[in-house]
Image (cartoon, grey):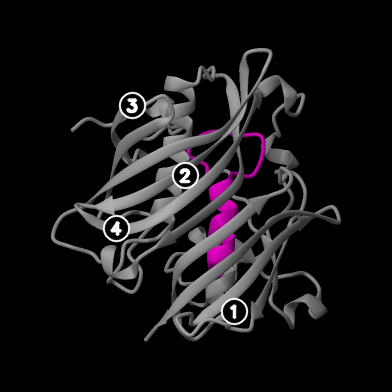
């Protein structure tokens, strides 16, 4: 078993690399391995029983960067932004075991788009297997662009807005307030509903593994998860499906509002369905539909 080089999965810390192996099976089909640890500093087990489903999302994100650079000619200095990310897991297949979970990703690339010979986007569809057991599936649409197309200069630390006080960690399923990404709103009216201000901490060792000029997609997915947890309190939630769209970059130096709405449950197999949105400067930047199981 080998671990993917950090630059191929857009990570700085070796401990944050999940991809272990990769093989091209056909022109646009691939098999990758990922290892999910039994304990992680941020993506900790859910209710002491399940691997964090966001590990599936992060595995797919890392796979997209690796495949883009290795097989589709994406230069290392290009930006790979998530446009859409859907992931679903089978709870019984992601239970904690005596060893780290060895996950196989069978991936097909579709909708491969090029302009003047350069890749501008592609979509990956993946089945996740643990041994021979189907553990879930995912779909990720990627936008690729030169970094020069982004902001003219990086955001300086002094340009970040003052961070709001964190929501009490237990409300969002966290132990450490540093891992809380939802802040208490400044207005009294917002505090009465399921509305928060996004907390952006560029010193966070996992969410900001390396310097970036916009809010990472995985931070927005974590905000969706935490908002779902808050909407379903006092129950602990296990997200079993997330369907997310990243409409526009979320800038680091502007305040971002997170809102959640608990929707009626239409499927007997669903415990809770929550729509979470992120808005910045009056425009919708991100939305996610989270289906969750409620744990005792």
Q: Secondary structure at mark 1?
A: helix
Q: Which mark is residue 125?
A: 2
Residue placed at 36% from the left, 33% from the top? 30
Label 2 crowd bin: few (<14), some (14–19), many (20+), radius 10 Å? many
Q: Does residue 215 show up magenta in the picture? A: yes
Q: Nearer the observer, disc 2 or disc 1?
A: 2
Residue picked out by circle 4: 134
Q: Secondary structure at mark 2?
A: strand
Residue picked out by circle 3: 24
In-image side of 56 versus 95 (left or right):
right
State the CA–CA distance, disc 1 to disc 3.
42 Å
Residue placed at 57% from the left, 59% from the top? 243
Q: Quadrant of the N terminus?
A: top left
Q: Which mark is residue 231?
A: 1
State the CA–CA distance, disc 4 to disc 1.
29 Å
In-image side of 268 versus 279 (left or right):
left
Q: Secondary structure at mark 3?
A: strand
């Amino acid at each position: 078993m080998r671990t993917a080089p950090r630059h191929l999965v857009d990570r700085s810390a070796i401990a944050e690399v999940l991809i272990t192996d990769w093989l091209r099976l056909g022109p646009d089909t691939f098999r990758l391995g990922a290892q999910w640890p039994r304990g992680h500093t941020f993506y900790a087990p859910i209710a002491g029983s399940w691997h964090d489903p966001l590990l599936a999302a992060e595995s797919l994100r890392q796979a997209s960067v690796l495949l883009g650079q290795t097989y589709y000619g994406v230069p290392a200095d290009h930006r790979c932004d998530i446009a859409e990310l859907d992931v679903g897991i089978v709870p019984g297949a992601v239970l904690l075991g005596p060893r780290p979970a060895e996950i196989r990703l069978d991936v097909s690339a579709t909708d491969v788009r090029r302009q003047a010979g350069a890749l501008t986007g592609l979509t990956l569809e993946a089945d996740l297997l643990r041994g021979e057991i189907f553990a879930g599936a995912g779909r990720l649409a990627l936008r690729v662009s030169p970094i020069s197309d982004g902001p003219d200069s990086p955001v300086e630390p002094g340009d970040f807005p003052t961070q709001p006080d964190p929501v009490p960690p237990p409300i969002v399923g966290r132990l450490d307030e540093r891992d809380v990404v939802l802040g208490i709103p400044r207005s009294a009216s917002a505090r009465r509903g399921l509305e928060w201000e996004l907390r952006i901490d560029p010193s966070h060792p996992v969410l900001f593994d390396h310097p970036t000029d916009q809010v990472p997609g995985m931070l927005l997915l974590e905000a969706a998860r935490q908002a779902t947890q808050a909407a379903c309190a006092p129950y602990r939630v296990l997200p079993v499906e997330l369907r997310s769209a990243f409409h526009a970059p979320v800038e680091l130096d502007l305040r971002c509002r997170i809102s959640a709405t608990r929707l009626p449950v239409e499927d007997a197999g669903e415990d809770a369905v929550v729509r979470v949105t992120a808005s910045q400067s009056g425009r919708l930047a991100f939305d996610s539909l989270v289906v969750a199981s409620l744990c005792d």
